[in-house]
Amino acid sequence: MKRQLRVLVVEDSEFDAQVMINLLRRAGYDPYMERVETADSLAQSITTKSWDIILADYNLPEFNALDALKQLQATGLDIPFLIVSGGIGEDIAVAAMKAGAHDYLMKGNLQRLAPAVERELREASIRSERRQAKRALQESEQRYRLLWETSPDAVILMDEGGFMQFVNPAVEEVFGCPPEDLMQKSVSVLQPERLKGLLMSRLEETLKAGAVRIRWRNLETLGLRRGTGEFPMEISMSDMELDGHRRFVCFIRDISERKKAEEELRESQEQFRTAREIQQRLFPKSSPAIQGLEVAGCSYSATAAGGDYYDYLPLQDDQWAVVVGDVSGHGVGPALLMAETRAYLRAMTLQCTNIGEILTRVNSILAEDVGTSRFITLFLARICPRQRLLTYVSAGHPNGYILDRTGKVKHILSRTALPLGRRPTTVYSESGSIPLAPGDLIFLLTDGVEEAAAADDSLFGIDRALGLIRERRDQPATEMVKALYEAVQKFAAKGPNMDDLTALVMRVKDSG
């Protein structure tokens, strides 16, 4: 296939132009030619079209080849420019070459035209590649310069003796020293006196071990900042070849904020651990032995310390109070509020058996401590095992359920009043007495059971919880609450973080 060639001919003779084009066609080109003979038409063609080569007669009626060359040079385009003339002296040809023409040929001897075009196209291609390589190098250097100058980490280039050859602007922020103050100084000046030899000794040990390349990652040590003293820093290092010499590049980061955050996290974890230990002591250590009832409960926190609560409180006349509560939120704050609620309830049940009155008193005290950002939902029931009666108050708590021995829900223990802490003047009243029958199951829980979410955002839900209790109604109460927790945990294993989870099951025993 012939090579395409776009040729701009500056020539007032159509015949001479066609002669040159025919010669190029015979040489294996497929030329597209446009002929111009004025400065204006030349300017139009150069600026609006793309050309591979320009062939120009020296003398034209309105201007000459040197004028055309100046027009081309003014555009900044690198297009091979060959003068093809009928007769110019050697001095004019030399001047044209000095002015920037790439070659000149005589019209009476055009055997050199095709070779000259081939050569100049090749040279133009080489110049283009060089320009692209130079531009790429400049862009690369610019990128590295920007990285060097804008890096928030101190970057230091040092020789084999540990003397700093180059430092970036960030060293002033990290070490408090202007870059010029560190040039040619030992890298040891960047550390406290007792550690001055650490960096170089580590480097020497690595080199003595026969390391071909140096690759340090995240060495933690201490730096010395002018004016403020010691600070924790992290050093990474690599080596490189520069001008035939081995050099070492250190990347140094001030990790004061990270260390502070790590320390705060350790302290926070310790606080959570302590709170968790205290909280675990507040839960019942075992289920109470209540004649006529089988009782079991469990509570699992979403974090080290949670806001859920359950308890069994003895009342007068062989009655028992059973409580399940949930403080809004997670962590140490809710855990402390849960402990406070527990203490008030235990104190009040020693003085009173009316659970409505107990919650009214507790609420009036808690409302002063809770504020507007917290509240407590709480279910408090009074059970008389001998008479098989249950009375309850639900302060905004999720529904409780009583199931008969067949697993059918016979009573829903719904909310009766606002959560604790919302309003200090709230009066809580007992429900009417609910009769219990042998085989009945009383099922109490916090919203962590119902609202446990799977990966697809579906919820565990109360129907699934009741279904599990119903299926296992013949098992011991301890097995039921354990199975419920395991089912919720499995359901939400790949979902969002679980909420605190508490459940309590009581079975009314048969007589005797």
Image: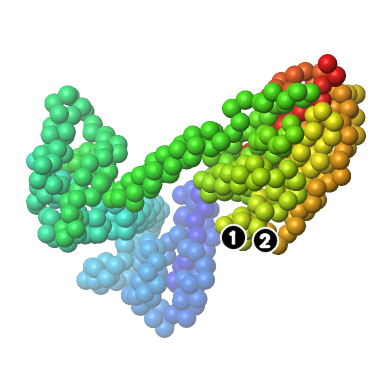
Is the residue 11 above or below the residue 439 in the image? below
The residue drawn where x is 46% and y is 55% is 23
The residue drawn where x is 27% and y is 66% is 97
**Residue 288 image point, x, y percent:** 67, 26
Q: Which residue is mark 1?
A: 368
The answer for how far apart the CA atoms under marks 1 and 2 are is 8 Å
**Label 1: element kind:** helix
Is the residue 471 above or below the residue 396 in the image? above
Looking at the image, residue 42 sits to the left or right of residue 484; the answer is left
Residue 327 visible to an observer of this rendering: yes
Looking at the image, residue 500 sits to the left or right of residue 354; the answer is left
Is the residue 141 above or below the residue 290 in the image? below
Q: Are marks 1 and 2 in contact (CB under 8 Å)?
A: yes
Q: Nearer the viewer, residue 428 or 296?
A: 428
Q: Nearer the viewer, residue 509 or 233?
A: 509
Circle number at residue 424:
2
Circle number at residue 440:
none
**Label 2: element kind:** loop
The residue drawn where x is 19% and y is 41% is 248
Residue 245 visible to an observer of this rendering: no
**Residue 412 image point, x, y percent:** 86, 40
